[in-house]
Amino acid sequence: MIVTLIVLCEVGFWVLLAAGLALRYVARKPRLGAAVLLCEPLLEAVLLVATAVDLKNGAEPSLKHGIAAVYIGYTVGLGHATVKWVDARVAHRFAGGPPPVKPPKYGMARAVHEWRTAARWIVAALTAMALLQAAVWYVGGDGDTGTLQMWQQKMLWVIGINLVIAGGYTVFPKQEPKDRVGAGR
C-alpha cells in the first residue's frame, strides 16, 4: 500500500504541477493556478498519515517506510525549487516570459549557487531524518527499526556529499577559461 501511495503521490505531484501551470499560463487564471499548486503539500500529508497508520497497524518498518520519509523530505527541501524551475521554463516556453536564468559557471558565484543547492538537500535530508526518528520512536523498542536507522545513515551521506561538493567549489573555485575571460560578459 505504501509503495503504491508513493507512486501515486509522485504522479499526483506532476499532475498538480501541470494543472497549476496550465491554469496559470494557458487559461490565464494565475490565482487558480497558484491555488492548485498550493495543494501539492496535501499529497505529502496523506503519505505521512498513511505511513503512520501502516506502522500503527503493526507493519514492520521497512524500505517502503524509509522511502516515504525521504520522499517527504525531498518535497520539503527541494519541492519549491523544483516548482520554480519548471515554472520558469513553462513561462518562457508558453507565456513569452524571459529565458530561465542559468546558474553561474565560475568563481565564487558558482560556489554560492552550490551552497544554496547543498542547503536545500540538507533541509531535505534533515527532514527525512526527523521523520525517520519519529517513526523509530513511534514503533518503540518492540519493533525492528534497523531499516529506518539505515535510511538515517543514508541521509547523513547525502548531507556529507553536498557539503563536500559545495566546499570543493569554495576551496577550488572553477575558473573561467583563459580564452573566454572578458568575452561575452
Image: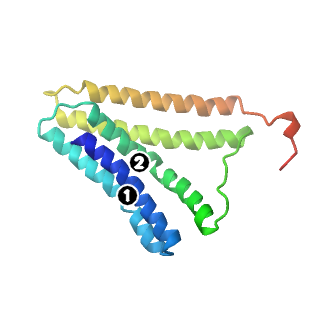
Q: Earlier in the sequence, mark 2 or mark 1?
A: 1
| Mark 2 neighbour class, 10 Å CA radius: few under 14, some 14 to 19, many 20 or more | many
- Name the residue that disc number 2 marks: 75
- Count of labels in the image: 2
Q: Quadrant of the N terminus?
A: top left
In the picture provided, is 68 more to the left or to the right than 86?
left
In the rendered image, residue 128, in percent from the top left (x then y), is placed at: 36, 39
Between the residue at mark 2 and the residue at mark 1, the CA separation in whole angstroms equals 9 Å
Which residue is pictured at 49% across the width and 70% down the height? 24
**Amino acid type of the residue that numbered disc 2 sits on in the rendered structure:** Thr
Which residue is pictured at 64% across the width and 29% down the height? 168
What kind of element bears circle 2?
Answer: helix
- Name the residue that disc number 1 marks: 40
In terms of depth relative to the viewer, which is nearer, 97 or 161? 97
In the rendered image, residue 11, in percent from the top left (x then y), is placed at: 36, 51
In the picture provided, is 86 more to the left or to the right than 99?
left
In terms of depth relative to the viewer, which is nearer, 8 or 126? 8
